[in-house]
Structure formats: C-alpha cells, structure tokens
Image (tube, rainbow, N blue to C red):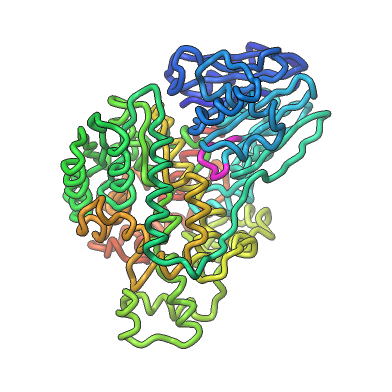
Amino acid sequence: MCGICGFSGQPDERLIKKMTDTLEHRGPDDEGFYVGDGINLGMRRLSIIDLTGGRQPISNEDKTVWVVFNGEIFNYLELKDDLEKKGHIFSTKSDTETIVHLYEEYGLDFPVRLNGMFAIAIWDCRLGKLILVRDQIGIKPLYYFFGGGNFIFGSEIKAILAHPGYKKEIEIESLHHYLSLKHTPAPKTMFKGIFSLVPGELISISNNKIKKEKYWDFEYKENNEIEEKEAAQKIIKLLSDSVRLRMRSDVTVGAYLSGGLDSSLVLALMSECTKKPINTFCLGYEEKFENKLDDLNAAREISKLYKTCHHEYIMSWKEIPEGIDDVIGAFDEPFAAVTSTFFISRLIKKYVKVALSGDGGDELFGSYLSHRLASPLESFQASGFDEAALKDIGLSLNDEKILRRFKKMKPWQWRSQLSVFSEMEKKVFYSKKFKTRIRGFDTGKLWRGYFAAGTSRDALNKVLEAEFKGVFPDQVLSYSDKLSMAHSIELRPPFLDTRLVEFAATIPGSLKIKRGSVKYVLKQAAQGYLPAHIINRPKEGFILPLNYWLFKNMRGFVEEALLSKRLKAHGLFDPNIVKRLLGCYYSSSQPAFSSEEFTRMSNKIWELVVFQRWWEKYFL
C-alpha cells in the first residue's frame, strides 16, 4: 500500500521513518523528510507517472512549498501546459509537481481545478501553514489526529497509530453505527480522536489552529426537460473522456471485468484508446453458483468481443478465514461489507499496476433495492398499488410486502430500516455495562441528516443523493481503494469523474429506473458498444457468496471467533445473546440463502466476527 504520512511537532526523522514503514507498500520509493519548523513529511510511493523523476516530497523552485500526495491527477498535462504559460518552471514530468505550482498560482482555490483521486499534504514554509486536501468524491482516504501538541496525519490510520503521541481507544459512537452500516461513517473513525477528511474537504493548520472548508460539492437539480437520447449521448461523451484521462500512465493499464454493464462499458471505451490488448480480470468461485457462472460467461464473452487478455481468479471459501486479518489490516477498522477486491487483486498484481473499474455506475444511475423501492414507495404511499401496477413497474408481490411495511415512513426512516442491526437489536446485543455508554446514539438520526442535507426533488434521486454523499465514500470507495492498494494496485473508477457525477445529478429518476429497468439511461448509452443481452442481463454484483459459506463451510471458524471467553475480553456484547443468535442461525438444515431474513442474520454474524478479529488485532 502506498500513502502519505507526517506530523507537526518535535522533529524526529526516525519517527517519520517508522510511520512510513507502516504504509505496507512493496514499491521502490520510501522517503521521510524534515522540512523545518517541526514539519515531517513521509511517503511510500507506488510509481505510476514519471517512474524515476517523481520521487516525493517535491518542492517549488525556491523550496518554500513542499508537497506529498497519494493518488493521481489525471488532467495534469493540461494543467502543466497552462501553468508553464504563466511562467512556472517544472523540474519533473510527474503529476505531483503540478500540485505545487497550482497552489502557488491559485492558493487554496487550487483543488477545484484537479481532475483526479488524491490525498494531498502541502507545507507552505512562507506562511507556516500545513494544508490537507481530499479529492472531491472521496476515492482516496486521509486521516488526522490533533492532540498533545502534535498534529498527525496519514492516508492510513496505521501511520497515526505508529506515533507515540496517540494512545489507542475505541470510539463508541462509531461502533454503534458500524453495527447498522457495516462500516464506520466519516468524519469519525473507530479510534477515538482520529478523524477522516470528508470528500471535497480542505483543512489548514497554522498557529496551532485548524480551519475546515468544503471546496467542492454538487446538487441534484433535475432537468425534467432533458430527452432520453440527449442524456444517453452526454453520458457517453463524458464517460469516454474520463476513460481517456484515466488511461494516462507510464505503466500498463488493465480492467476489472465482472460481466456486468458498468465494467463492460468501461472496457469498451478503453478499447477505443489503445490498439494493444487489454488485460481483464474476473472473479469466480469453486462452487458452481448459477448466477456467478453467468457472470463469468458474460465476462468471457465481452473479453472475446474486445480481444482482451482475460484472466480469472477462482476463489475458495478457505481464503476468507485465511485472509481476514490481512483484510482488516488494510482498513485498520472493522469492515463487514464487500471484500472481493482483496482477493481478485492477488491475480491482478501479477500483470498490471493500474486497473479501471465500473465503480459508481450503480450509485449514480440506480440499481440497489433502496433505489428500486424509492419511486414505487412514494406512489404507494399516495394511492396504493394493485397487482397489475406492481408488475408494470417490475416489482413482485414480495416487494409489495416491503412497501406495506414502509408505507407510513419518511425516506430516512425506511432507508434506515434496511440496516443490518436495528436500534432495538443493538441494545439487546450490548452487555449491561456497555448499554450505559451508548445513550443518545442513533443511526437513524445519521440517515435523517443525510436526507435533510439533500437537494433533490424526486423520490429516487433523494435516496441516491443521501447514499452517494453519506455512505458511498466510506463503504464502496473504501473497499475499492484499500483492498486494491493492499496489493499495490491502483484502481481508477471513470464513472466518478466530477463532470459525469454532476451531470448524472441532473437526470431525473424517471430515466434512471424506468418500468422496472434499473440504470435505464445508462443502458441506452451502452447501445452499440455491448450486445443487448449483456446490457439487460440481471447481475448480482461484485459480492462474495458469504451467506452460503458462513452456513455451509465456516461454522467452526465463526463459533471459535465468537466464543464467550473472547467476547468477555472487551465486555461490549452479551455472550449469551450472541450464542443464541448462532444457535438460531445454524438450527436450519437447509435455509433459504437468498431470503431477506437469512441475509440479515448472516450479516449480523459476520459483523460480530469482523469486529472481534479487529479488536483482538489492535487491542490485545
């Protein structure tokens, strides 16, 4: 894993070396640097642009401004050309140096001009100011701690943990939210006092004071006059240019290819940018799951269509218990959502250092259960549905049961009901002693805040906006980046170009899900690039068959992880209630693996297992 770290306080080059050593990257560059006034900057670099000349930190001409950063600036050539016309002199060919001169030219307004994914640290010697910036969408993480006379920061939490100025302690509120969301919601982390910058945020530190500001945000302002064809054409234009920029690299670029619409369309547009065969990668499983076989076959068909060098990673359930500690170590926090990226990246690293993905397509254009329910629920609340109406919009009678359950709820209320643990369930699982420490915490209030901050006017976009700005960076982007970088793979998502994100926010929900067809307008955009049966095929997504494995293969591992004596070591959960959950879970001889009830129970168990392994890794 590559990344940045540093601190302001008592200078100690040995300490910054220790902090950079915690950024577990196997690449060639490993630097710690003291730039004066108690500022230490460190870097482990995954070299993608200017392999030999881009070593960090990089300064301006008179060495008064220094920068380290993690990520890529995709429009750096255009920015460099403009800055050179303004008189700036470049000493390297790297995208990193663009940041230095852009800051010199525009001050704190510089980040909005960047098209990329980045966590940036700038030290301005002239002003005695440290500046931290996270990219607009939140693709790259950036953490900090301020206390005891030290300001410590890093693109991984482990860099902060390595500093003797920080003493580890669990953030109780984060644990409460984790049990509902599968992840820790920013700006807090699972470590008390360690915070995350949120997407599009800049903080500056000088005179022992911190100032925060949002340098970028966007609104959902639906253009109800836009025609379907016009929207589809604009999507392709923006996505195509995003792919072109993300193909910039001094090393070979590959592609994730899951067999679904999003990754297949990205590959199709990549093929327009190069004549060389593209390395593509797909994940499969030893068990013959029908839907997963369909994904593999679809990926093979697209690979053949675009003449790629196709590779498949066939995974065994045994890799979950064997790899869980490494996965947790990549996050430094308990994380119980998708972890597929970690395992397929074992294969990818053998062939390429950079890979494009389809991440963001579902979140921008609508695909998940919460998206499919949004507009029908609004209509159902107004007038109800008969069976014919349900079929017309692609819903089943089972969906009607969900609609009836949510009929009297506001959007934030029913969306919070899709959580793993409800508020009542969490209180049941907590130990008597711990219950007194979580009073006032409510994940429902978190969802209410996400929706209250929304700008959208239609039902679907209200949900898309709340999720995109609320949970998407901390969950989907977190696992995509951290689990790929754990294998020194840089994952680039073309759907998350800010220009495309802003345009998608103007498309009304009626074009995103139409007559039950999810991502409808994106499917129209893909016409001519992909076969119709690929565009319209149902796809489960990049999700491990964890429900099946937990029940069929991993019982011993689960029960060992959640032994009462292990739970009593921290005293957060009631061991008897956990034991009862396990007994109920494993009591059935043949459960309905795809049912909502069984899935929620599996998720509960997995969250507890992951938390327990995390706690033992970091606190024992």
Q: Image quarter for residue 34?
A: top right
Q: Is residue 23 visible?
A: yes
Q: Is residue 14 left or right of residue 279?
A: right
Residue 83, percent from left and from top: 61, 26
Q: Residue at x 76, y 27 (%)?
A: 129
Residue 299, percent from left and from top: 21, 45
Q: Is residue 370 above or below residue 249?
A: below
Residue with the most extreme right position: 207
Write down the region rendered in magenta.
Answer: 136-142
Q: Is residue 141 in the magenta section?
A: yes
Front-lying residue, 40 or 136: 136
- Magenta stretch: dominant SS? loop
Q: Is residue 213 left or right of residue 388?
A: right
Front-lying residue, 339 or 519: 519
Q: Residue at x 38, y 33 (%)?
A: 247
Q: Residue at x 50, y 70 (%)?
A: 224
Residue 151, percent from left and from top: 72, 28
Q: Residue at x 55, y 34 (%)?
A: 118
| Quadrant including the C terminus | top right
Q: How many marks?
A: 0
Residue with the most extreme front position: 85
Q: Is residue 285 in the magenta section?
A: no
Q: Is residue 584 visible?
A: no
Front-lying residue, 511 or 286: 511
Front-lying residue, 412 or 255: 255
Residue 345, percent from left and from top: 33, 33
